Image (tube, rainbow, N blue to C red):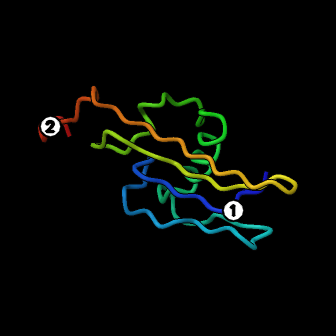
């Protein structure tokens, strides 16, 4: 599968306003940057969209801190087919930390 477009909302370090990652026309990419900037989170988003697993983390741990919902959308192609995978999650039972717990 070749990733074409990746969109994340409240996934790990990314919040609601995360820019869409457009990979169309890119044949080789290098993810680089300082520690903690979300490079691994992008790979986690792809694996979670495809298989529902991200580096052995629980699904609840993937939701950005202080949020109750998240979504990953991946557009990818394989051979001559293009696929759109949308994996949303919403938790109404998550307890958000208070200022004292932060």
> In the image, residue 51 lies at what x, y percent?
65, 34
Please report the residue visible at 72 percent of the width from the left and 67 percent of the height from the top: 29
How far separated are the C-alphas under marks 2 and 1? 39 Å
> In the image, residue 57 lies at what x, y percent?
52, 31
Secondary structure, mark 2, is loop
Determine whether 101 is above or below 84 in the image.
Answer: above
Secondary structure, mark 1, is strand
Please name whichever residue, 82 or 38, is drawn nearer the observer in this view of the structure. 82
As drawn, is 22 to the left or to the right of 95? right
Please name whichever residue, 42 or 22, is drawn nearer the observer in this view of the structure. 22
Classify residue 31 by image quadrant. bottom right
As drawn, is 57 to the left or to the right of 84? left
- Assign the C terminus to one quadrant of the image: top left
First reached walking from the N terminus: tag 2 or tag 1: 1
- Read off the residue under disc 2: 98
Please report the residue visible at 66 percent of the width from the left and 40 percent of the height from the top: 50
Please report the residue visible at 75 percent of the width from the left and 73 percent of the height from the top: 25
Determine whether 51 is above or below 81 in the image.
Answer: above
As drawn, is 60 to the left or to the right of 45? left
Q: How many marks?
A: 2
- Read off the residue under disc 1: 4
Instruction: Single out the residue that lies furthest toward the left.
Output: 100
Please report the residue visible at 65 percent of the width from the left and 56 percent of the height from the top: 75
Mark 2 nearby-residue class (10 Å; few <14, some 14–19, many ≥20) = few
> In the image, residue 96 lies at what x, y percent?
22, 35
Mark 1 nearby-residue class (10 Å; few <14, some 14–19, many ≥20) = some
> In the image, residue 101 lies at what x, y percent?
18, 35
Determine whether 4 is above or below 95 in the image.
Answer: below
């Amino acid at each position: 599968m070749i990733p074409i477009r990746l969109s994340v909302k409240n996934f790990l370090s990314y919040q609601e306003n995360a820019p869409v990652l457009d990979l169309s026309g890119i044949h080789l990419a290098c993810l680089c940057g300082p520690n903690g900037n979300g490079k691994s989170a992008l790979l986690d988003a792809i694996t979670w969209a495809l298989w529902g697993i991200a580096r052995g983390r629980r699904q609840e741990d993937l939701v950005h801190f202080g949020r109750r919902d998240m979504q990953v959308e991946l557009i990818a192609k394989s051979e001559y087919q293009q696929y759109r995978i949308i994996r949303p999650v919403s938790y109404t039972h998550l307890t958000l930390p208070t200022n004292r717990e932060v």
